[in-house]
Amino acid sequence: MLLLTVAVSMLLLVGFLGLSIDVGRAVVTKSETQTFADSAALAATMELDGTMAGLDRARAQAQANVNRWMLETQTFSSIGVSFGTSPNGPWETNPLTGLGYAYSRVSVSAPLPLLFMPYVMGSSGGVVQGPTAMLIVGAPSMNVRAESAGGQVPVTVFREGLFPFSPYAHNSTGPHYGLTPGQRYTLRWAANPRVGQNTCPGDDSAEMIALNDRGGGSERGYIESTSANLIRQTIVDDLQTVELGIGGQVTMTGGAKQSMLDAIITRVRQDADTSSQNYSTYALARRGTGRRLVAAPINTGYPNYTVVQIGAFFLLAESEYNKGGNNPICAEYAGAWLKGAKQKGASEAGAWEVRLVQ
């Protein structure tokens, strides 16, 4: 009787030990699949720019994710990618357009082989559903699944990273406030601007010149500290000395034009693509690292200089800033700025950053 009791107890002990091993492996695999889904969703969302090409890049980024499972020995093969215009979906695998799709959802699963559970549970069949996995009782594997969604969420306040120039809004209607993507606008105005002579194309009108002239000689477009060292740091190193955001006010400070030009040329050279003449060419070439895309506050001008929008501006090729003389410093308006991206964001305008939303 004692031997029988010991034998039964040993079987139960071994059974529970086997179950605990399989459950522990399932927990580890769940963590690995979730890590993959989270990182893949973030990487995919970073590629979204409102175009079909952006959707294709997002899919490719999710598929190329290097995270593995089974203690980093197995690659994931069952990967699903879908897109939405809101964090709650609906989610579409193949949208008809990329416009407005600023959210990516990645789902992934791993067929974890079971070592003990099929023998302990028997082969009676059935399904056990839970947050970690779906277990088919009596089957030799457990399908461990994970899902995650990333989104481009708005940024309205900046403590660092804003480019130290502030172009003027052309009207009071959002989201572009009168600026046209693809057009060049003024970062720094020339002294005594004249229509058709020394203005950036987008600001080449008597109305915009008059708006610029109302603030006096210091109103050149630059909004940061005027020492040569800080001019360089604000342009090249993304230093920002004053917190700024939508509804705040910029202060025009003037500053030495040559110091600005030298720093802007250095900033252009930080990018892997220094030669593209406009943003569309830059985006198509896919050689750039994003350093030529800067976030600049757009303001209402004299007397309040209220920030109404943050926009992405594309710095021109180096040759455009080597002209010298009484020329303005221009940049091309691209639309939405996406923090850390190599291209603009998926929305029409504004400043955005990628975060997990599910």
Image (tube, rainbow, N blue to C red):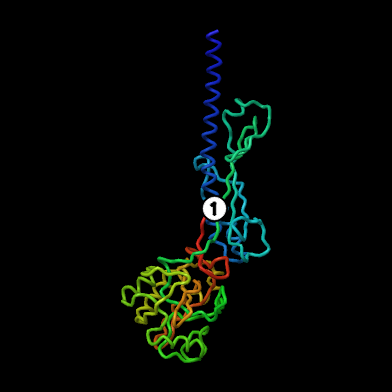
Residue at x-position 62% and y-position 32%? 140
Instruction: Using the image as rendered, state which of residue 63 and residue 236 is in the foreground.
Output: 236
Q: Position of residue 192 (x, y in %)?
A: 42, 91
Q: Residue at x 57, y 45 (%)?
A: 146
Q: Quadrant of the N terminus?
A: top right
Q: Residue 196: image x %, image y %?
A: 50, 91
Q: Where in the figure is residue 182, as x and y percent of width and height?
A: 55, 77
Q: Looking at this rendering, what residue extends furthest in the top direction?
A: 1
Q: Is residue 38 left or right of residue 101?
A: left
The answer to whether 75 is drawn above or below residue 142 in the figure is below
The three-letter amino acid code for the residue at tag 1 is Ala
Count of labels shown?
Answer: 1
SS state under label 1: helix
Q: Nearer the viewer, residue 254 or 317?
A: 254
Reading the image, the residue beneath label 1 is 40
Q: Badge 1, how many Cα within 10 Å: few under 14, some, many 20+? A: many
